[in-house]
Image (spheres, helix red, strand yellow):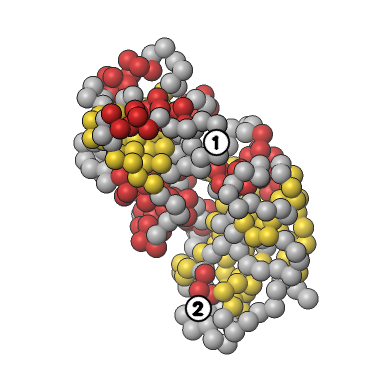
Amino acid sequence: MEKMEAVVFTEANKFEMRELTLKDMGPHDISVRTLVTAVSPGTERWILKGKHAGTRFPCVPGYHRIGIVEKCGGRVKDLHPGDIVYGGGGGWQEDLFSMWGAHCSYSVEDAAGCRFISSFLPDKAELETTVFTMASAVGYKGIRFLEIKGGEKILIIGAGFIGLCAAQLAVLKNAFPVFMETNSDRIAFAKELGFRAWNPGDKGFDRAMKEFAPEGTDAIYDTAGVAPAVDIAVKYAGRWSRLLLQAQYFDRNNAIDIDGIKMKEMTIKTTCGVDSGDWDSAFTEIRKRRLRIDSLITHRFLSAECLRGYEMLLEGKPFNLGIVFFWDRDLIERHSQTTGR
């Protein structure tokens, strides 16, 4: 029986690498050798802590994955060996749950769950940026749902990966994003990228916000899921503005102040997951380098070292944002040297 290596969250706050047995291929399945995967900083942290909705242990995490097709089932018509695909994870015979299951060296999965990327191997830079398409698409959907227009001022709660993607996409629409963030490292990182970012606990926050948007912001985009932070942000919202709640809201002891939102007659919007069009649009923006994912990648590891990435994710130290795992670096490096890219 064929084997694969996979990241396994054994219980809350614990993780390891395990050898798993691949499931048998069916007529609609493809076998895929993993090239690169990426950590979703928010979702995977919450899964690891056991707080994400539906989390069950032990499980294989992750939903960012690019691989190369090696075999196709008899009824697979649209994919061929050698194709590069974007997919979640595959199946295994052990009694493990799938929290999308992307972080594995090899997979057997339904071809319908994969997206065709290319008939040839992209270079290393394109692989490590486009692997973040799913998280980037979350930011794309958020900006789309908020109907951001040129000249508008948007307050983004949380300068994490999705927030920084959303800010870039807002700028592409000629809007003006600003961050509300309590983590000093994230504030510094956002400023290095050219964005304004302030801590609501600082004395100058009120003045900075009123100078930024004297009539109040046109939109608030919440990526943090902290009710008190939303309440603070609403104080700086303009009348008839929009509020997007896109985070996970785990703290049942703290509720968002709906009266504050009601008094300004704000429109509340929510999103969950991404649509196909959002994925396609985010992928295009990344490939055109209008959405600069390269600037958000802070750490790269070989698959044999990827547990170090989860140590950083769990502890929050050193500062980390985009984390990439290379599962077949030799193939990628040989291709990059051959193409000169």
Write down the quadrant of residue 67 in the picture: bottom right
Residue 108 place in picture, x, y as percent? 64, 72
Residue that mark 1 sits on? 252
User: Residue 219 location in percent, x, y?
Assistant: 30, 36
- Three-letter amino acid code at disc 1? Arg
- Residue lying farthest to the front in this orientation: 259
Q: CA distance from mark 1 to mark 2?
A: 45 Å
Q: Residue sitting at 70 percent across and 78 percent down?
A: 24
In the rendered image, is residue 249 in sight? yes
Quadrant assignment, res 238: top left
Of 228 and 181, nearer the camera is 228
Is residue 31 or residue 97 the one in the foreground?
97
- Observer-nearest residue: 136 or 80? 136
Q: Secondary structure at mark 2?
A: loop
Check residue 79 in the rendering and tell me which mark sits there, or answer none: 2
Q: Does residue 303 show up? A: no
